[in-house]
Image: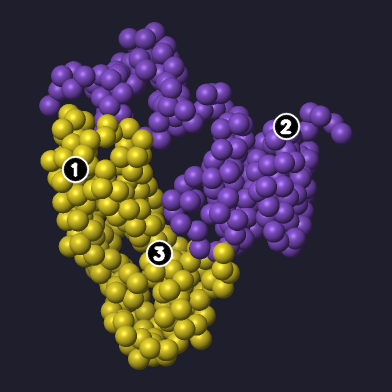
């Protein structure tokens, strides 16, 4: 086996879906090894060491398996967790996955979503999904929530505007908070800034 | 986990509610009262003069099925879609938001950390934004759609209205995003005090709202917008 090849795991009880997805990935995303598992337990036993680039979870086992999935997530932060939806799944469950594909989508769409989702994961810093911000990110956050623009922050920290924007993106990924107002509360709650430093 | 999910004309209405209780909101917004005995979806629709196809499209969205474009194109009762969305707005403004506001002020009386003040401000600003958005839909989008759908043939669009549905896409992202922020702050970051119970109530209510807003934007994006864009094209000819 070519060990440079990346792995995609498909986890779910339906053979029909397994075959369908496998075919789609083979055709549109050549160069991946595909592993099929009937349930999360078998996946857990079988692939721990394989470090798949993506895991596609069948909607019918997502709810009951979310605990196991969340603990596996911590072991391999660079893996993209994708939900395959064809039945009702709660929004809060969906939000715990990195990407959503549905059986109404055509093969090209499905393949490109899987691909996009894996690409996103690669860009992420290693300590992803913890809210431990790096020193630089903390600096950026501090200035951001006290009202400085990206340009001003770049000038102050002697970095490019693009770097500021990418820090901001990573801050949101790590904290799960996207809006500026939300990040302000995060910064106060984590003692990154004091209430006094907030004007208004 | 059970499987039968796709709602069909002969599905029993009581079954589909038991299976996905969030569908209760659909019944409410379409003004189909409960006490539905063993009636099927089709029977209820006939009884309340609701376009069956439309009911099925929306109900199945609740269950995670996106409609296919040809289904959407064949829908006739655009008035009903608009009235559904308007009732949905009313539900937010008269029930959901007041409830959330009361939970948040309860939290601020039970939790003395200074962040709670910021949370209150965050929520107030969020509400302002949402109201602004609802107002925009109620006063600009919906009248525009109705006019487009029901103006008599041959009547030209005399308003000189440059508005088009293209302006409207993607309008909801912000609203859903802030809601997620709010939940994350409550679950992960805000320091605890004596507010655990009411925080739970708030989070559960936010979950419900999040789901409903999601369906709301799905209806607008995969039902309303395609219909209107087709009407706009016809209108241009």
Instruction: Give whichever of discs 1 and 3 has the lower sequence position.
Output: 1
| Visual hue assigned to chain A | purple
Residue bearing mark 2: A49
Judging depth in this view, the residue of A153 and A23 nearest the camera is A23
For the residues labelled 2 and 3, the Cα–Cα distance comes to: 43 Å
Q: Are marks 1 and 3 on the same chain?
A: yes
Dot 1: element: helix
Q: Tell me the residue at 32%/37% (across/down).
A: B185
Q: Are circles 1 and 3 on residues that touch, CB within 8 Å?
A: no
Q: Nearer the viewer, mark 2 or mark 3?
A: 2
How many residues crowd mark 2 within 10 Å: few (<14), some (14–19), many (20+)? few
The x, y position of residue B24, in whole percent, is 35, 72
Residue bearing mark 3: B219
Q: Are marks 1 and 2 on the same chain?
A: no
Residue bearing mark 1: B107
Give the position of the C terminus of chain B as an image quadrant. bottom left
The x, y position of residue A193, in whole percent, is 25, 19
In the image: residue A103, left or right of residue A37: left
């Amino acid at each position: 086996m070519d060990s440079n090849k990346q792995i995609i795991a498909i986890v779910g009880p339906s053979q029909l879906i397994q075959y369908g997805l496998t075919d789609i990935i083979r055709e549109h995303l050549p160069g991946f090894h595909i592993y099929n598992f009937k349930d999360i337990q078998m996946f857990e036993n079988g692939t721990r060491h394989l470090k798949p680039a993506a895991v596609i979870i069948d909607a019918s086992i997502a709810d009951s398996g979310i605990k196991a999935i969340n603990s596996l997530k911590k072991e391999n932060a660079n893996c993209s967790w994708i939900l395959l939806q064809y039945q009702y799944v709660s929004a809060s469950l969906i939000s715990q996955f990195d990407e959503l594909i549905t059986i109404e989508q055509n093969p090209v769409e499905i393949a490109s979503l899987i691909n996009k989702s894996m690409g996103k994961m690669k860009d992420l810093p290693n300590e992803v999904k913890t809210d431990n911000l790096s020193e630089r990110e903390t600096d950026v956050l501090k200035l951001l929530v006290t009202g400085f623009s990206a340009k001003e922050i770049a000038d102050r920290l002697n970095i490019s505007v693009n770097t500021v924007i990418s820090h901001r993106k990573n801050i949101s990924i790590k904290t799960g908070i996207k809006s500026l107002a939300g990040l302000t509360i995060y910064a106060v709650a984590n003692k990154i800034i004091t209430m006094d430093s907030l004007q208004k | 986990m059970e499987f039968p999910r796709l709602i069909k004309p002969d599905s029993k209405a009581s079954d589909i509610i038991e299976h996905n209780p969030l569908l209760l909101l659909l019944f409410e917004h379409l003004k189909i009262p409960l006490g539905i005995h063993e009636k099927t979806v089709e029977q209820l629709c006939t009884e309340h003069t609701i376009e069956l196809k439309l009911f099925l499209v929306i109900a199945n969205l609740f269950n995670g099925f996106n409609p296919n474009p040809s289904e959407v194109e064949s829908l006739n009762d655009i008035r009903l879609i608009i009235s559904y969305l308007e009732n949905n707005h009313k539900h937010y403004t008269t029930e959901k938001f007041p409830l959330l506001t009361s939970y948040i002020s309860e939290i601020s009386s039970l939790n003395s950390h200074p962040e709670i003040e910021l949370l209150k401000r965050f929520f107030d600003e969020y509400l302002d934004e949402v109201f602004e958005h609802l107002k925009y839909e109620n006063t600009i989008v919906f009248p525009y759609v109705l006019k487009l759908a029901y103006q008599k043939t041959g009547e030209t669009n005399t308003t000189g209205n440059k508005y088009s549905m293209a302006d409207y896409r993607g309008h909801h992202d912000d609203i859903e995003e802030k809601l997620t922020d709010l939940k994350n702050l409550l679950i992960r970051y805000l320091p605890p005090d004596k507010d655990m119970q009411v925080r739970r109530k708030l989070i559960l209510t936010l979950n419900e709202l999040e789901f409903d807003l999601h369906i709301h934007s799905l209806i607008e994006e995969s039902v309303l917008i395609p219909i209107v864009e087709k009407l706009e094209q016809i209108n241009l000819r």
